[in-house]
Amino acid sequence: NETSISLDSDKATVQLVYHSGMWTIYGTDTIGDKRATIYQPISTIQSSSFTITDADAGTWIPCSGTITVTLPDGLDNGFQCVVDNQGTGTITFSAATTLEGKGSTLDSQWAVAHLLHTGSNIWRITGDIS
């Protein structure tokens, strides 16, 4: 079942669509086509070390345990995901090249990190980082 809401003006057209448990916003402005996911689907809980992939784009990734999340080179500019520490272990982030942020670990339960690939193999990490 799909629900949608459309807003139109002389500058932009925006459509908010709910489908398969996820809200997505689509729109076109005078610059070109713009798309952004405003509700992130939840992926399977991760309990061992893993590498972020294209399939993780726009997802909320719950983790439990003491693990390492590797941030690879080569993902699209603007790639984003969220990692949530649902356990009591430490989640460590490791970038293949550059990781910008105030730290590289989630070391408390319910801590959350937002990961953004800004291009040129540079990752930015924000959130409950230490």
Image (tube, rainbow, N blue to C red):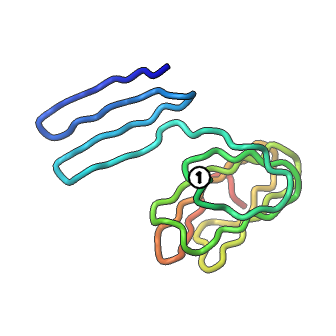
Q: Is residue 67 above or below residue 119?
A: above
Residue at image x 52%, y 65%? 117
Give the x, y percent position of residue 53.
63, 61
Whole-percent x, y for residue 75 in the image: 54, 67
Residue drawn at the location 60% of the way across and 38% of the way down: 41
Q: Quadrant of residue 86?
A: top right
The residue furthest bottom is: 97
Q: Name the residue under label 1.
A: 81
User: Is 14 placed above or below 80 here?
Assistant: above
Which corner quadrant of the image does residue 3 belong to?
A: top left
Q: In which quarter of the image is residue 71?
A: bottom right
Give the residue at the far front of this rendering. 1
**Residue that appears at 63% across and 66% down:** 102
Characterize the local packing of mark 1: few (<14), some (14-19) or many (20 or more) Cα atoms within 10 angstroms: some
Q: Position of residue 59 (x, y in %)?
A: 60, 46
Q: Which of 60 and 19 is in front in this view?
A: 19
What count of labels does the image hold? 1
Residue extending farthest left: 10
Amino acid type, callout 1: Cys
Q: What element carries label 1?
A: strand
Q: In this view, does 16 lie above or below 107?
A: above
